[in-house]
Amino acid sequence: MDDGPAEVISLSVAARGAAPEVREALGALLADGLDPLLAESGYHPGGLPALRAAVADRYTAAGLRTAPEQILVTTGATQALALVAQLYLRRGSAVVVETPSWPGCLDALLAAGARPRRVPLDAEGIALPGFRAALPGAVLAHVTPTFHNPTGVLMSAARRERIAVLAARARVPVVEDLAYDTRLWDAPEPGPVAAHAPPDAEVLSIGSLAKAVWGGLRIGWLRGPAPVVERLARLKARADLGSPLLDQALAVRLLPRVEDMRAARAVTLRAGLAGLEEHLARQLPGWTWQRPDGGAALWTRLPMGADAAVFAQVALRYGVELVPGAMTDPSGAHDDRVRLPFTLPESGLADLVDRLSRAWTACAGQEVSGKRPRPSRHTEQSVTCRS
């Protein structure tokens, strides 16, 4: 065959462009908000005070009373997780994680020397029997309670409370990653795990503006006990002396409008989900999935126990860069899965599924003939799953 399409459709990012409010807020900031910022030194390792206060107010409004000194502003949620790993972990530290999980989470923990203890999910989130069994001797637990990446599962309020109680009894700090807050439906979302936790629990809550507002606005944060936040702020100061103030000032203006932006995103994402499901059902009827509670991707199972990593190599020749299940779970339990974002426009979704269909036909043809497709040097794939 020829060298394939000139432009590759990359599915390594499940995100759309900036919300329209970003342009409006930037214009307002340039018009009347720069002078106070430009008059100061520009160094706030813990974050711009106005933004720390605004994030704290957001948690308080969600039922989790929070003071500004309990907030650390970070350069995206990924930095927040990396700082937590740096503070808590040493080489060989046992960490409880969900499986499957976001590859970026695994990368941050493994880079700090962690030994993951993987616990599967059920319909309500991380499974309790496995979570309970994995806690003894662990130094940290990481969960994604709101729209888990990649499955889209929304952890129930009861499960959040049990997670917090079990971890507190075992004296294991919990990191809850709330950055993937891409709503699809109008159903209410439970409060953070920290809001369900007993007084002696240590819960760190990570958030971000990447999904609701724009991934290009590298603003994230961490909420936790004030002494822990102070220690994390010192680590951040060593890394970069603080996140850019102009971005933070823009975030201050955008944060009150986040719920409106999430609602607008949901309309677009629902349309994308419906379109992707329609195309898949028509062209790849053997592929199956569970409709997600939220998020921006379908966690899709390939038929006949197909190896998704092998299929990803074939798909790349047809111009699609896939995230196979092995990237989210190295145990092999999800090797037949791929993550399919529905963030492309309708025409892009049609093109995507058409390419996947042709790649699947080619892959299945090689399987039937006994020539199982394997990666070759010119098709080897290096994918960084960025969101």
Image (tube, helix red, strand yellow):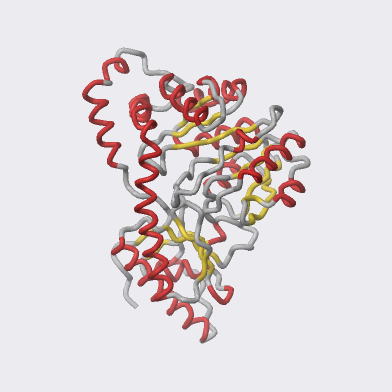
Q: Residue furthest bottom?
A: 369
Q: Residue 93 at what x, y percent from top left?
A: 70, 40
From this viewpoint, which residue is outermost toward the left? 31
Q: Is residue 327 left or right of residue 258?
A: right
Who is closer to the viewer here, 63 or 149?
63
Q: Is residue 215 visible?
A: no
Q: Residue drawn at (49%, 28%), measured in percent from left and top?
A: 239
For residue 115, above or below residue 6: above
Q: Where 227 falls versus 370 (above or below)?
A: above
Residue 211 falls in image quadrant: top left
Along the horizontal axis of the image, is 38 left or right of 52?
A: left
Pick the front one: 299 or 291: 291
Query: Residue at left 55%, top 61%?
Result: 325
Instruction: Judge whether 169 appears above or below 267 on screen.
Output: above
- The residue under the point 52% across, 34% down is 80
Q: Position of residue 32 (x, y in %)?
A: 24, 21
Quadrant position of the N terminus in the picture: bottom left
Q: Where does the image place residue 180, in percent across and percent down from the top left?
A: 48, 45
